[in-house]
Image (spheres, helix red, strand yellow):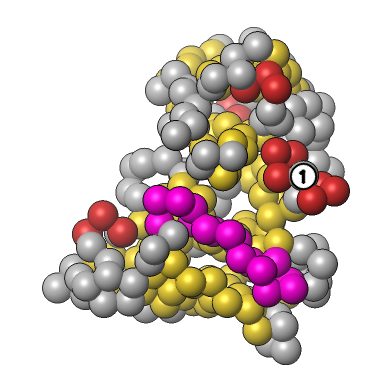
Amino acid sequence: QVQLQESGPGLVKPSETLSLTCSVSGGSISSYYWSWIRQPPGKALEWIGYIYYSGSTNYSPSLKSRVTISLDTSKNQFSLKLSSVTAADTAVYYCARHVVPATQAQRAYFDFWGQGTLVTVSS
Amino acid sequence: SYELSQPPSVSVSPGQTASITCSGDKLGSKFASWYQQRPGQSPVLVIYEDNKRPSGIPQRFSGSNSGNTATLTISGTQAMDEADYYCQAWDSSTAWVFGGGTKLTVL
């Protein structure tokens, strides 16, 4: 059973960079896509972006200018950086395994999720 | 940009059938997935590719997708099914998008 665990600071100051890491256990990070998804308090889920084990990335058009996702296969981890944060970036951030059957994006879904970590943007 | 719309809330009596809808332009030509999120917990995949159930998901959960609407159906609803449910699909303009969520109340 694949398990994911997010880690990182729970408080970030406005205009600074949010940095989170997702540790994957119970399976290799290879051969899958890995995504970050966030959920502002009381609101809906929002996909942020993914990284493929090869290192290729794809980001949400609305966040693309501020997002970087990277991979460390030796540690079975992937990371998120979100720059120039504001209060609107306050959310629970989840990492998830992103299944893309036969590389068909429209068939894709998220089958394993981390427990989530709350990041608050405040001075 | 592509949007998915869900009713904010649905109520059902125990043992009855609950239907939760998700609407989007030509959604039937795409694939829909559904996630259950209990309070304070992470989302759990309950339906993918319109009507497939992951291992461990009870048979009472089923899905369909046609026209502009995808539907999650829970037959013989139990108290443990009370949760928020989110639909998800992909569109070339917005990539992966989620609906606004539906709170299912089992009265």
Residue B52 visible: yes
* Amino acid type, label 1: Gln
What residue is drawn where x is 69% and y is 28%? B30
Residue B61 found in image quarter: top right
Q: Which structural element holds mark 1?
A: loop
Which of the chains bears the disc numbered 1?
A
Position of residue B42 in the picture relative to residue A20 (left or right): right
Locate the N terminus of chain A by quadrant: bottom right
What quarter of the picture does the C terminus of chain A occupy? Answer: bottom left
The residue lying at 47 percent from left, 22 percent from top is B6
Q: Position of residue A66 (x, y in %)?
A: 38, 66
The residue stretch that appears in magenta: A48-63
Between B105 and A72, the one nearer to me in the picture:
A72
Q: Is residue B91 left or right of residue A13?
A: right
Badge 1 density bin: few <14, some 14–19, many ≥20, Cα 10 Å: few
Residue A28 in the figure: left or right of residue A63: right
Q: Residue A65 in the image: x percent, y percent? A: 39, 63
Quarter occupied by residue B53: top right
Q: Position of residue A47 (x, y in %)?
A: 51, 51
On the image, numbered disc 1 is attached to which residue?
A104
Residue at the left extreme of this rendering: A123
Disc count in the image?
1
Q: Quadrant of residue B80?
A: top right
Res B80 seen here: no
Residue drawn where x is 34% and y is 42% of the image: A42
Q: Residue at x 67, y 49 (%)?
A: A110
